[in-house]
Image: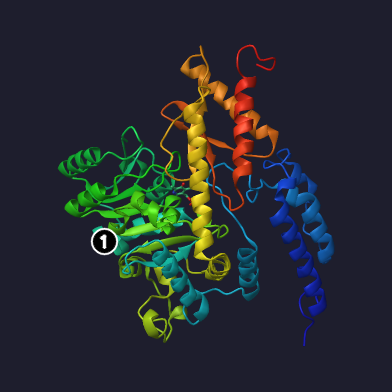
Amino acid sequence: MPDPMPPHLSPEEIRDALHRTADLVADYLTGSERYPVLPAVEPGEIWSSFADEAPEEPVPMDHLLDVYRERIEPAVTQWNHPGFMAYFAITATAPTVAGEALSAALNVNSMLWRTGPAPTEMEYKMCDWLRRLWGLPEDFVGHLVDTASTATLVALAAARHRHDPEVRRRGSAGRPPLVLYASEQTHSSVDKAAVVLGVGLDQVRRLPVDERFRLRPDALAAAVAEDRAAGLAPFAVVATAGSTSTTAVDPLPEIADLCAEHGLWLHVDAAYAGNAAVCPELRAHLTGWERADSIVVNPYKWSFLGFDGSVLLVRDVDELRHAFSVVPEYLKTSFLKHGGGEAGDLPHLMDLGFQLGRRFRALKLWMGLSAMGAGALRSGIRRHVRLAAELARRVDEDPRFERMAPAPFGTVCLRGVWDGPSEEETDTRNERLMERVNDAGPVLLSHTRLGPRFVIRVVFGHGRTGEEELETVWRLLAGAHDALSPGSPST
Ligand SMILES: Cc1ncc(COP(=O)(O)O)c(C=O)c1O
């Protein structure tokens, strides 16, 4: 027997290392507030604090965990901090961490059913749990990918294949250019998908929105008609349910009607707001999404299930299989279908996208969701919606602030207003206002622009974000506004 590869850890040493890791996780998950949300590190500081070469000899785990605690943990942006109110907040919990750790230990690659029976079947099962929680029809089948960007790319590849099944073999050279429709508020992942798929950014129609930042169906209808008349090939629409800037939901029923009329694939990007469908009273915002050909929801975003993990639901899973399945000899298996029972007709996971290898993400979803329970998931989302409504109310009633968009979910768009300065000066002052709030440490906010206007977003989304963070962010916003007002010593 050759010596085992280092690290030569005995079972006891493995336990010690992982028990210490568990202590670090417990301290972190319950005490990330000891850090400012934004770390006080300079660019390059971490790079230069590590040796230039990998160590030749094994380094003891104890030392590595010391370095982790002293140098790495404080130098991340604290996404797992209840004051993280930027972008869209995300949450790791002890069960999701346990699921990730066990998945790392199993180290399974579930490309085929035979290379990962439990991961394959649990992935389909967990997506079905979520589908049911979201109240979507049972013909939707889901699978897990890393992020919404991947899901949207995969969905649009299936859309392209439906439009022109020959594209797999022949490519798209010599064919009328494909055209994709979205709104000017649609996430940039759609542009990236158009780049990767060879649609080209010039063929992404970024359509105008109404006063509530929702895609205008009349503009969609006109653009499709114009492109058809010009000999181009419209093939898909991406509608957003919960846009990144303002959480606006496009008019899904009207868009679904137009897609049906013109034979276009409807992909709904519900990466953020799809999570809200777990609460029946919030589902009305999403009416029409059940008519999509494909939907992406990121449970990592607002279902407290740890980054990463994005669900792509498709109405006809065979459309994915036909778009993607390429099986080299070494992956041919006698299990043409992946098992018996109700899951018997579902494809191998490798047939559902461009990736061959698949992580066992379903383990973390199962642990996270089961340990939390759907009831707690609903109460978490309801709490955030309530907190956002309360902040929106304060903004509406306070002449120092102005609300910039409706706030149907957990996100509020606002800006400070002052007597006197021009719109441009107000934008600059709001940038400074946000910097002041962020420099204070206990919360982190991020911005967007609506038209030319600088807008501050406040997101209630972390599992531990509650009343205290609402009070903190309101105090900091009001304090920064006052400090930037004429006559203030710090203006
Ligand atoms: C509406 C929407 N779609 C897609 C994405 C991209 O998400 P991911 O990072 O999972 O690719 C985001 C990111 O915040 C988003 O807000």
- According to the picture, the residue beneath numbered tag 1 turns out to be 162
Residue 10 visible in the current orientation: no
At horizontal 15% and vertical 42% (from top left) the residue drawn is: 229
Name the quadrant containing residue 306: bottom right
Q: Is residue 479 above or below residue 446?
A: above
Q: What is the three-letter code of the residue carrying label 1?
A: Arg
Q: Is residue 449 above or below residue 114?
A: above
Which residue occupies the foreground of this view, 93 or 447?
Answer: 93
Which residue occupies the foreground of this view, 218 or 84?
Answer: 84
At horizontal 58% and vertical 37% (from top left) the residue drawn is: 445
Relative placement, left or right, of 390 versus 472 is left
**Crowdedness near tag 1: few (<14), some (14–19) or many (≥20) residues, C-alpha within 10 Å:** some
Q: Where, quadrant-wise, is the C terminus in this rendering?
A: top right
Relative placement, left or right, of 169 versus 445 is left
At horizontal 53% and vertical 22% (from top left) the residue drawn is: 400
Q: Where, quadrant-wise, is the N terminus in this rendering?
A: bottom right
Q: Is residue 328 above or below residue 173?
A: below
Name the quadrant containing residue 345: bottom left
Which residue occupies the foreground of this view, 260 or 196?
Answer: 260
Residue 424 visible in the current orientation: yes
Residue 485 picture location, percent across and down: 60, 16
According to the image, what is the colour scheme of the structure? rainbow
At horizontal 39% and vertical 57% (from top left) the residue drawn is: 280
Relative placement, left or right, of 148 versus 266 is right
Disc 1 within 8 angstroms of ligand 1 (CB): no
Total marks drawn? 1
Which type of secondary structure does the marked residue at label 1 adopt?
A: helix
Residue 107 picture location, percent across and down: 61, 73
Residue 455 picture location, percent across and down: 49, 30
Residue 105 picture location, percent across and down: 65, 73
